[in-house]
Image (cartoon, rainbow, N blue to C red):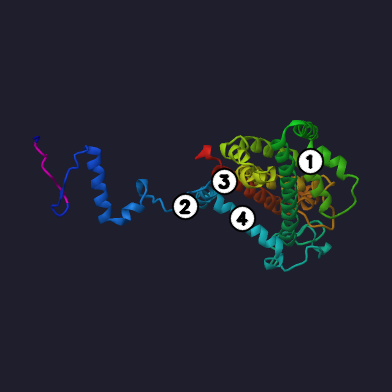
Amino acid sequence: MPEQPEPLESYEEGQAIAPTGAGGASDLATAEGETLEKNPSAASEGPLGTGVDKKPRSLWSDAWRDLRRNPIFIISSLVILFLVVISIWPQLIASGDPLDCDLSKAQEGSQPGHPFGFNGQGCDVYTRTVYGARTSVTVGVLATLGVAVLGSILGGLAGFFGGAWDGVLSRITDVFFAIPVVLGGLVLLSVVTSSTVWPVIGFMVLLGWPQLSRIARGSVITAKQNDYVQAARALGASNSRMMLRHITPNAIAPVIVVATIALGTYIALEATLSYLGVGLKPPTVSWGIDISSASQYIRNAPHMLLWPAGALAITVLAFIMLGDAVRDALDPKLR
């Protein structure tokens, strides 16, 4: 008869763990089982104590966690939030009328109650700068929404179905890419007499959707090759279900990043077109219009140009910084 091994003394309470005779792996499993009976909370802990009962983190939850820790995102978001608030309620910080002008005060500097001075028509530069945020933010947001919706739909359909539809859309986008934006604005908007923002927004959407279309097309092509899409197709999922439930949530991140950065670009483009005289027209209050009218007085009254140009630069920079932060958070390769 072979000798039976001696019982192993437990490190807790001096209890013995009897060997099973099936080998070290079985004995270890027995020991673990007894440990779990003593400490049931250990069963709910996964590797590294993360806990198997917690929900798995997604790309969006990880991105939001990174954004909350990014000072660039926090600063740019606060600036944009302030711009949105004064765009909706400019009366909160400016009690005057941007169209109330006094020629006797033309080009005068800072005075009590008028910290930014007056422009060439005697209008308060501070009030016009505050009210100009409404026009610029409205144009930028609406143009970005139009470009994102139109470009995402056309590019997504081209990337999903491919074939002739993809070929035709690719050639159309090549034509639009060959049109210089500023030159196209000079040609198309020079015949428009309306002083509203809609012609400018329509022009930006017309020439801006090809860029988002290319981004959406490439993202959809990449997403539809993943295994979960192929599995959904094998299970008989319809094209609409695959697009809405499986492809769009996983292909929309690059579109959001590009659209966020492009929003600041569209605000700068509106100011450029207004400066050239083909964008927004008086009596609309716009930073581009004020910069255009102040450029001829830059030597005698630089304050007329400094404040609207500074507001425009800060706004564009805030949206570009926000887009960079969102890109870093949504791109797994940058983690």
Which residue position is annotated with label 1?
Answer: 207
**Residue of label 4:** 79
Q: Is residue 100 magenta?
A: no
* SS state under label 1: helix
Q: Whole-Å distance between the Cαs marked 1 and 2?
A: 43 Å
Q: Nearer the viewer, residue 295 or 77?
A: 77
Q: How far is mark 3 from mark 4, CA to CA?
A: 14 Å
Label 4 CA crowd tier, 10 Å (few <14, some 14–19, many 20+): some
Mark 3: few, some, or many residues within 10 Å (few <14, many ≥20)? many
SS at badge 4: helix
Q: Nearer the viewer, mark 4 or mark 2?
A: 2
To which residue does mark 2 refer? 55
Q: First in sequence, mark 4 or 2: give its number.
A: 2
**Which amino acid type is marked by label 1?**
Leu
Q: Residue at x 79, y 61 (%)?
A: 123
Q: Which residue is mark 3?
A: 325
Label 1 CA crowd tier, 10 Å (few <14, some 14–19, many 20+): some
Task: Look at label 4 and name its amino acid.
Answer: Val
Q: Earlier in the sequence, mark 4 or mark 1?
A: 4
Which is more N-terminal, label 3 or label 1? Answer: 1
| Eye-nearest disc, 4 or 1 | 1
